[in-house]
Image: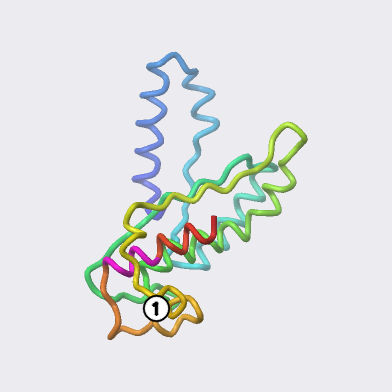
Amino acid sequence: CRRPPKAKEAAQDIIQKLSETGMDKKDLSKRLIPMKLDLADLKSVDDFSEKFQQKYDRMDDLIFNAGINFPEWRASKDGIESIFQVNHVGHFRLAMNLTPLLIKSSSDQSIGRVISVSSWGQKFAYKPLTDWFKDDSMIQDKTKFDANPMYSLSKVANILFA
């Protein structure tokens, strides 16, 4: 989570709600631990990946659900158009960093999974897609930017990655 205080508050809410269903609050508190991660900053993604692998020796599933949409072109800390970076590039980098742990955690009974959430919005991506994915020049071109098609393009990238 980008904002640790909000993550801590959300974790406490989740723990409270799940404990009301009979789940053990102490066990939940040990298992639901917020960690700082900003997908708009690849250094943050790398730092999170390193800290996660130092803290945990296994990972069963990795679920990507974060997404943003801004009305104007914005550069991320890395200079990448921010919608595309947060919605796709950050997730992709995180998956590449954590794939070895997913593989290590797999067994004959269970394999590690990467689940990438997309949306119906992918239907409204720029066309033809090949022009947008052959390199990053069109994604980075401020004159071609339109928020909703860019959001949609990031969701297509999630589907192609999955």
Residue 132 pos. (x, y %)? 43, 77
Quarter of the figure with the C terminus: bottom right
Q: Secondary structure at mark 1?
A: helix
Residue interval drawn in magenta: 148-153
Q: Where 35 sits versus 44, above or below?
A: above
Q: Judge from the rendering whether residue 5 lies leftward or rightward of residue 130; answer left or right.
A: left
81 vs 64: above or below:
below
Looking at the image, which is closer to me, 77 or 111?
111
Tell me the chief SS of the magenta region: helix
- Residue 84 located within the stretch drawn in magenta: no
Q: Considering depth in this image, is 84 or 76 the residue closer to the camera?
A: 84
Q: In front here: 125 or 104? A: 125
> Which residue is rendered at x = 50% and y = 26% of the image?
28
Write down the residue under mark 1. 139
Tell me the quarter of the picture where residue 141 sits: bottom left
The amino acid type, in three-letter code, at marker 1 is Ile
Residue 107's place in the image compared with 19, above or below, is below
Q: Residue at x 56, y 63 (%)?
A: 93
Vertical placement of residue 43 versus 8, above or below? below
**Residue 150 magenta-highlighted:** yes
Q: Return the x and y of residue 147 as percentages of the image width and height.
A: 27, 69
Within the image, what quadrant is residue 19 found in? Answer: top left
The residue located at (36%, 52%) in the rendering is: 119
